[in-house]
Amino acid sequence: MPHFSAITPFVHWRAWLYGAISLAVALLIAEIALRVLFGLAARIARRRGGDPAHTALRHIRRPLQWLLPILAVSAVLPGLPASNQARILTAHVLGFALIGVLGWLMVAALYVAEDLLNHRFRIETQDNLRARRVQTQLHLVRQILGVIIGLITLGIALMTVPAVRQIGDGLFASAGLVGLIAGMAARPTLASLIAGIQIAFTEPMRIEDVVIVEGEWGWIEEIHTTYVVVRIWDLRRLVVPLSYFIEKPFQNWTRNTANLLGHLYIYADYTLPVEELRQQVHAILKTTPLWDGKVWNLQVTDAREQTMQLRVLVSAADSGKAWDLRCYVREQLIAYLQKNYPQALPRTRVELPGKVEGEGISVA
């Protein structure tokens, strides 16, 4: 008996040493595998010289840095000298973490797919209607799938806990009441998800669309599952609920094409020769690249007591160029009138009675 009692602590200490060594070796192998994997992926990315490979590495690096160590610890767990209770508790924690990391990896895969397709369909090009449509759909679908994956991952992870599983079994007996309560509580979230699906496929607006919302002119900058960020022309940000674009009217200037017709008004005296000014408008448009060469016109759209209203119609490739073109043409026409027809500029006439009967003094 003394012989065996002296050997037992040594055997127990040696078992812990072997367990610690096996755990360290498993973590070391996981770290080496990570470095080799990321090194090969980075080399391939540099060789191909493309952003998609780099963005894929950026998204999946963090979940993989957790996944491989969890798998390594799970592999050596049965051989560790621990009690059954401690081993079962550790296995539950590792299983919970593994489910969470796998869900994280699936969400990262969604980001990778979105970035790959965004790289293919770029919105920096001149005619980017299809690219904006694809990016908007991808953005909303990725967000919706991310929410679904998160809920499923959380549900599976909670069902691995015995206490939660028993609660779940009891709740299934009253599923009607629970479903009603959950439906009422989640109604805003469900409404936002449904609105997101509608916007993704009916496309009332897309990313980088030019819109007028609540009297503000700007671009659609971000589309989320519950709200939309509109970048106002003066760099302010207007945050609008997603359901707003389903329930209320708004202006979309780039719904089918980015081309726009711009107009401006000039008020002049009746003595101004309209045809000559019309030709001057055409000459001004030929001097600027802001005009796309498609549409131009000048018409007298109103005749008032003292002045006539002249409307100039011009076309441009997008809303920004249309605004700059309108300002440019307006400035050039004012300068032309000041130089060549100053008497045709708007003025007020007053007639005063003269000393001679029937005679008057006209003051401009």
Image (tube, rainbow, N blue to C red):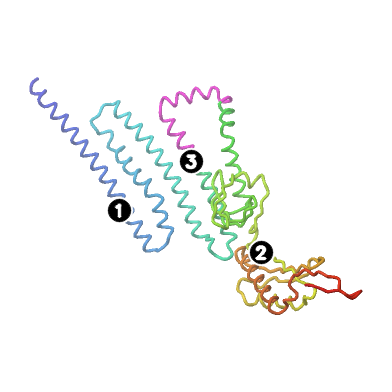
Res. 260 mark: 2
Coordinates of residue 258 in the picture (x, y in percent) = 62, 62
Q: Which residues are magenta?
A: 150-177
How crowded pointer 2 is (Cα within 10 Å; few <14, some 14-19, many 20+) is rated as many
How crowded pointer 1 is (Cα within 10 Å; few <14, some 14-19, many 20+) is rated as few
**Which quadrant of the view contains residue 280?**
bottom right
Res. 96 mark: none
Coordinates of residue 363 in the picture (x, y in percent) = 79, 72
Q: Residue furthest top?
A: 1
Query: What amino acid does circle 2 point to?
Result: Leu
Image-based side of 102 in relation to 191, left or right: left
Check the picture and name the quadrant holding the N terminus: top left
Viewer-proximal residue among 335 and 231: 335
Secondary structure of the residue carrying numbered label 1? helix
Give the vertical position of 319 relative to 170 (above or below).
Answer: below
Secondary structure of the residue carrying numbered label 3? helix
